[in-house]
Amino acid sequence: MAKPKLSTVFLGGCFGCHMSLLDIDERIIELVDIVEIYKSPLVDRKVFEERSDIGLIEGGCVTEENVEVLLALRDHCDFLISVGECAIMGDIPSLRNTIPLRECIEEAYLNTVSTWNPTHNIPNDPELPLLLNRVHPCHDIVKIDAAIPGCPPRSDALWEALQALLHNKPVQLPYEILKYD
């Protein structure tokens, strides 16, 4: 019998949610015994060729490329979970939503004290991902089936959610593994 497939994507964020997934420590061995990590930065598969049972999204949509990746994940996953505050609300990357995009870019490439840019050119190579005018949480773009809050979520919250889904149980995360003291 084939193992359920788990896919994860990294959009605009800090990779902390993937680090939290890796922080399940020795349970990662149990996880790979019961799932196939199908498409993920952890396995480096570039395109979907098959469906995944569960998809985990880290980060919000900052670029057009992020939107394309998220749409592909939604199209190829049966159950999609926003993981962490960037995927759920846009979090730190969305702080730029109150400032015009051009002003943000000029601040980053021209105006900061630590910027050394003698040509005063702003990168515009067509290979660079095109920034969106605003950062979007994932539910702005696709239907999300569940969310695991935190910045990043505790590894125990990720573990408990995956265990519930893989055993066809409802995801009920106790407050103790969601709170931060």
Image (cartoon, grey):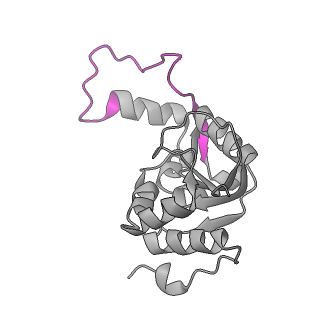
Q: Within the image, what quadrant is residue 129 found in?
A: top right
Q: Nearer the viewer, residue 98 or 49?
A: 49
In this picture, is 72 found above or below 177? Answer: above
Q: Quadrant of the C terminus?
A: bottom left
Q: Residue at x 33, y 31 (%)?
A: 111
* Residue bounds of the magenta highlight: 110-135
In this picture, is 51 found above or below 47? Answer: below
Q: Nearer the viewer, residue 90 or 41?
A: 41
Q: Residue at x 57, y 53 (%)?
A: 36
Q: Quadrant of the N terminus?
A: bottom right
Measured as percent of width and height from the top left, residue 108 is found at 38, 34
Measured as percent of width and height from the top left, residue 94 is found at 53, 50
Q: Can residue 40 be found in the magenta stretch? A: no
* Left or right of 122, for residue 112: left
Q: Can residue 116 be found in the magenta stretch? A: yes
Q: Within the image, what quadrant is residue 101 found in?
A: top right
Q: Main secondary structure of the magenta part?
A: loop
Q: Residue at x 48, y 34 (%)?
A: 103
Camera sees residue 43: yes
In this picture, is 94 found above or below 110? Answer: below
